[in-house]
């Protein structure tokens, strides 16, 4: 069948319509015309595979990685980088009324600090595009040009330096996977916090304490809450090492945290925040929330649940070039 790709949706698939039926076609680009065959049919949509690109986009390019299209790690390598960021911005504009220009990545390959390959029958690899089949792979260009079996899968680069702070990270606690771009993200968050003039900040899902410590000079007190004992151990050590005394870390579930102060920083995992967390924020004295998310869908859901707060701005950061993922920093006020 012949299909015209209307747009590329979250997750990275192209969307086409055939007699009103939605068809998702991976590895395509907006406005391309392809010949495709259906691979699966579902109640509300079908999936198809490209047989031939009939009308090629000028943004199409040869994927740099030979495993692209088999390995499930990347979805957008067939597009120019300019097109990748345009697509991410366009997708966000469908969800949020105010989307500021995306901050592009300073590099688009070899940027990951950490990868987690799987092992099968003595081979290294990743899950395939079906998110299930093991695909043996000898290198990942998002991480390094070297062979996976010859190098550690976590780049030990000493402490992470941000402004005058030295932050210890570990492969056992969460840290942003793209150090250079995460500096841009953290500086942006700090610039937002500075505008708020907060007295007390609660930093929910604080990890090893980067945002708590970075913003400590801007408030009287900061409370950092995080589930992982290892992350909190490092956060306390980072506070001590940097001589910061107005930040208080606690290892606990964000769901059980007392929300103090006028500003809440929140950066939950992909699943978003639990309703109890959002309820606690609603019942707190917080005037402003700075919500950082790596999943626009759960972010949109959570913003709707934060009734009384309105979205002031939404700034995307491309932390994950070649993939369909995007990081977003939003400001909410009441
Ligand atoms: C996206 S990371 C954010 C880390 C930190 N803000 C940073 O920039 O490095 C999410 C963090 O939430 C923590 N986490 C997951 N579930 C949690 C929960 N229910 N309560 C508190 N923290 C949780 C994870 O351990 C992880 O460190």
Image (spheres, rainbow, N blue to C red):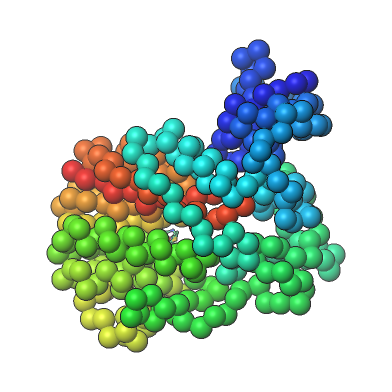
User: Where does residue 212 sit, x and y in percent of width and height?
Assistant: 30, 69
User: Where does residue 103 sit, x and y in percent of width and height?
Assistant: 44, 54
User: Where does residue 313 sit, x and y in percent of width and height?
Assistant: 30, 45
- Res. 112 image quadrant: bottom right
Image vertical order of residue 291 relative to residue 96, above or below: below
Q: Nearer the viewer, residue 137 or 274?
A: 137
Image vertical order of residue 73 relative to residue 190, above or below: above
Q: Residue at x 32, y 84 (%)?
A: 242
Q: Split into 4 quadrants, where in the image is the C terminus?
A: top left
User: Where does residue 49 sit, x and y in percent of width and height?
Assistant: 76, 33
Number of numbered markers? 0
Q: Residue at x 26, y 43 (%)?
A: 312
Q: Nearer the viewer, residue 42 or 60?
A: 60
Image vertical order of residue 93 relative to residue 237, above or below: above
Q: Residue at x 51, y 58 (%)?
A: 105
Q: Residue at x 52, y 46 (%)?
A: 85
Q: Split into 4 quadrants, where in the image is the N terminus?
A: top right
Q: Nearer the viewer, residue 72 or 108?
A: 108
Quadrant containing ligand 1: bottom left
- Res. 189 image quadrant: bottom left
- Point out the residue furthest to the top here: 19
- Point out the residue furthest to the right here: 121
Q: Is residue 255 visible?
A: no
Q: Is residue 318 visible?
A: yes
């Amino acid at each position: 069948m012949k299909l015209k790709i209307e747009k590329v949706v979250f997750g990275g698939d192209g969307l086409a319509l055939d007699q009103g039926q939605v068809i998702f076609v991976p590895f395509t680009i907006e406005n391309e015309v392809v010949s495709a065959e259906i691979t699966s049919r579902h109640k509300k949509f079908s999936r198809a595979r490209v047989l031939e690109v009939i009308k090629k986009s000028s943004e199409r390019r040869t994927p740099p990685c030979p495993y692209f299209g088999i390995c499930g790690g990347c979805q957008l390598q067939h597009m120019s980088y300019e097109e990748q960021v345009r697509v991410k911005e366009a997708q966000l504009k469908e969800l949020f009324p105010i989307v500021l220009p995306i901050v592009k990545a300073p590099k688009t390959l070899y940027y990951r600090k950490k990868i987690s390959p799987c092992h099968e029958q003595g081979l290294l690899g990743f899950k395939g595009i079906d998110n299930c089949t093991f695909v043996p792979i000898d290198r990942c260009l998002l991480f390094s040009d070297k062979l996976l079996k010859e190098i550690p899968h976590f780049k030990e680069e000493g402490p992470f330096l941000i402004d005058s702070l030295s932050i210890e990270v570990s492969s056992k606690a969460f840290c942003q996977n793209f150090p250079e771009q995460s500096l841009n993200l953290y500086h942006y968050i700090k610039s937002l916090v500075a505008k708020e003039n907060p007295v007390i900040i609660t930093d929910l899902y604080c990890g090893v304490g980067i945002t708590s410590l970075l913003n400590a000079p801007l408030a009287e007190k900061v409370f950092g809450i995080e589930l992982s004992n290892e992350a909190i151990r490092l956060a306390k050590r980072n506070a001590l090492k940097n001589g910061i005394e107005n930040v208080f870390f606690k290892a606990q579930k964000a769901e059980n945290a007392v929300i103090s102060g006028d500003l809440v920083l929140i950066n939950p995992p992909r699943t978003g925040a639990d309703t109890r967390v959002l309820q606690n924020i609603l019942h707190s004295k917080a005037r402003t929330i700075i919500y950082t998310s790596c999943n626009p869908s759960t972010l949109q859901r959570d913003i709707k649940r934060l009734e009384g707060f309105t979205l002031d701005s939404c700034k995307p950061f491309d932390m994950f070039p070649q993939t369909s993922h995007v990081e977003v920093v939003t400001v909410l006020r009441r």
